[in-house]
Amino acid sequence: MIWGELHSFLLVFLSGLIALMLNIHYIEVMIFLTFCIPFSMIMLYKTSVYLEDLIFCMNDMNGMLIFMTLSLALLIFLSSWAITSMLYSFLQLALLFILLLCFSLNNLFMFYIFFESSLVPILLMIIGWGYQPERLQAGLYMIMYTVMGSMFLFVIIMYMYHYTNTLNMFFLFNFSCFSATIFWVGIIAFLVKLPMWSLHVWLPKAHVEAPLGGSMILAGALLKLGGYGLYMFSAFMNTSITGTVPVTVITLAMWGGLISALLCLGQSDIKAMIAYSSIVHMALVIMGCLSGTSWGQLCALTTMVAHGWASSALFCVAFMSYEKVNSRSFILTKGLLKLYPILSMLWFMLVLINMAVPPTINLVGELLAVPVCMWINPFILFVLLLIMFLSVTYNMYLYVEINHGSAGSFLLSGQSTTAVGSLALLGHMFPLMLILNMNFLVG
């Protein structure tokens, strides 16, 4: 019964989304997304049961990711109300459509098609509505890294079809004879998408040049495609792989997260610092997905969901600060507390969320990572503790540098914090504070 309801909801929602893309009106889009979000919560009901048919599948991870993506889409449209371009709204809806299909499709080849298609809308948003001439270079870096990584994934998908004669994920989960080489090559595309350290060069450049909506959906939902793909491929692991490839990737990811946390302390651009903090959090997602444990997968899901709302909110509040100073530089952006106390309070709340203070679900994700790291290797636990300490340090640095100090002449004292922006930020914080009953994750 519940699968029939979910199947109907997905078909009706995707049909309605296509209709909106053909005739876009801001109010209609907002109303449509507002009504769809409560219905998407049906997917969180008993999602520990794996549901699938020939087109769609539903499990404990993609149900939550679909709900998060829909809620973020509403908040992104709310934050981008000043951009009245029909093409910009169309690209946002198209990217939402692609993301929802990626999270719900049951065929690995169709997943790959939409996985690659997600690059087109975000690339056009960066090139068309970016702020600086360097946006062309940022778009080139993003395409070069992601497409080259995905070529390996395409080869592995073709190999799987030749070997198993099917690309249905449910049937592929029953095959446990994929070698370590197949697994290693297959996850490169997802490690680029997350991204993992050493494959991350495109992310800070894309974030710095992207418009507000592009940065929000890139950090909030698009990076989660890599985590979801890694979660799916981790199901193909068997005992012959467990001791080789995953431990190597986990070690590289955790050390990369530590280096990224150190780099956050040396950034001069606010958006670049938030982008590097995303790499830190995605290291925990890689560790959780590849640990091969239920606690690890729960850690990955919780971290992805918490990071999705938190990072999107940070880019939103960074844009609100940019409107006051016309700069993203830490050197010029100082003293917001004196002229904009409400904006400063929002900064403070979001920084606390990003450093995983209770009672947010960010803390749950980091606490779940502790026993998983201990189980993998006690030395990795030591790296995790260093990451947690540096996370608190660079978040405190972010808040103090922007809000304290003497207010410069660059600050535009005549502009107040808009109610729409404050509402969008509170909408990001609301689920992070209230999703404290973890039963929807564990059964």
Image: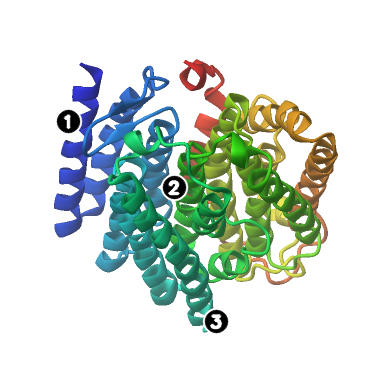
Q: Residue beneath label 3, please?
A: 134
Instruction: Say which mark, if any, is on residue 201.
Output: none
Instruction: Say which mark, if any, is on residue 420.
Output: 2
Residues at circles 2 and 3 in contact by the CB criterion of under 8 Å: no
Quarter of the image where one finds residue 10: top left
Q: Nearer the viewer, mark 3 or mark 1?
A: 1
Neighbor class of circle 2 (other Cα within 10 Å; few <14, some 14-19, many 20+) is some
Q: Residue beneath label 1, please?
A: 8
Name the residue at 76% across, 62% down.
407
As shown in the figure, which amino acid type bears the numbered disc 3? Glu
Compare residues 72 and 348 and report the one nearer the observer.
72
Ranked by sequence position, the earlier of labels 1 and 2 is 1
Q: Is residue 162 in view from this perspective?
A: yes
Ranked by sequence position, the earlier of labels 2 and 3 is 3
Q: Is residue 99 in view from this perspective?
A: no
Label 2 sits on a secondary structure element that is helix
Quarter of the image where one finds residue 432: top right
Name the residue at 61% across, 28% down.
293
Compare residues 293 and 94 and report the one nearer the observer.
293
State how far apart marks 2 and 3 are (Cα).
30 Å
As shown in the figure, which amino acid type bears the numbered disc 2? Val
Residues at circles 1 and 2 in contact by the CB criterion of under 8 Å: no
Side of 237 relative to 169 (left or right):
right
